[in-house]
Image: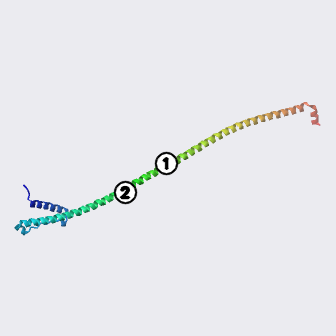
Amino acid sequence: MEESHTDWLRERMREFVVDSRALDSADNILNFRRQTSSAKNPGAAALDLVYQAAEVIGDVEKIAAEREAHAESLANQAIEKLKIAEERVRSADSARRAAEAEITAFKERVEKEFNVKLQEIENAMEQAASRIAATEAQLTTAEQQANAAEMRATEAENALKRIEAAIQSQILSKRVGDPSKRSVKAA
């Protein structure tokens, strides 16, 4: 069963009216008025329906063009926002890379300075240890020299005591054994 062109056009118009109601706009309401003359002249009624359909199609095309323009505007705005967001991401990424490079350079510089200071401290400790060892050696030598000097002083003191004892024994023995010295002393 083949539909007639008029029935087809009426069906499409009904679909449009249903779709227009879904848009909930007073401008989208379509009224097909039945004219009394259409009953008398079916050709004029069909022509009137064609004009009304053309008017509706024009309105639909206008609304579609407006919506397309609005959608295109929204899409362009979204694209601009996306470009701005991408630029911010690139900028943030660039800043992150710069910060990482700066942190790496700082870390390397601190490590170098730390190693230099550590080496200086190690050198100073080695020098101090060397001086301490030299001082300990000098102290040991000085202690040995002091002990040797003390031993010599003890020996000298002992020798002096022996000499003194010998001198005293010689003087006493001469005094006791020589009678002339006794009378000189007595006189």
Mark 2 falls on what kind of element?
A: helix
Reply above or below: 15 against 148. below
Q: Nearer the viewer, residue 83 or 96?
A: 83
Q: What is the distance, in whole Å, between disc 1 and disc 2 at their CAs?
A: 31 Å
As drawn, the label of residue 87 is 2
Residue type pointed to by label 2: Glu
How many C-alpha atoms fall within 10 Å of the one at disc 1: few (<14), some, or many (≥20)? Answer: few
Q: Classify residue 150 by image quadrant.
A: top right
At x 46%, y 51%, the residue is: 103
Residue in view at x 42 percent, y 52 percent: 97
Q: Position of residue 10 (x, y in %)?
A: 11, 61
**104 versus 83 height, above or below:** above
Q: Which residue is mark 1?
A: 108
Specify the amino acid type for callout 1: Glu
* Residue sitting at x 5%, y 67%: 41
1 and 2 marks in contact (CB < 8 Å)? no
Rendered location of residue 54, percent (x, y): 15, 64
Closer to us: 4 or 118: 4
User: Dot 1 lies on which element?
Assistant: helix
Horizontal side of 45 relative to 184 (left or right) equals left
User: Residue 84 at x, y = what percent?
Assistant: 35, 58
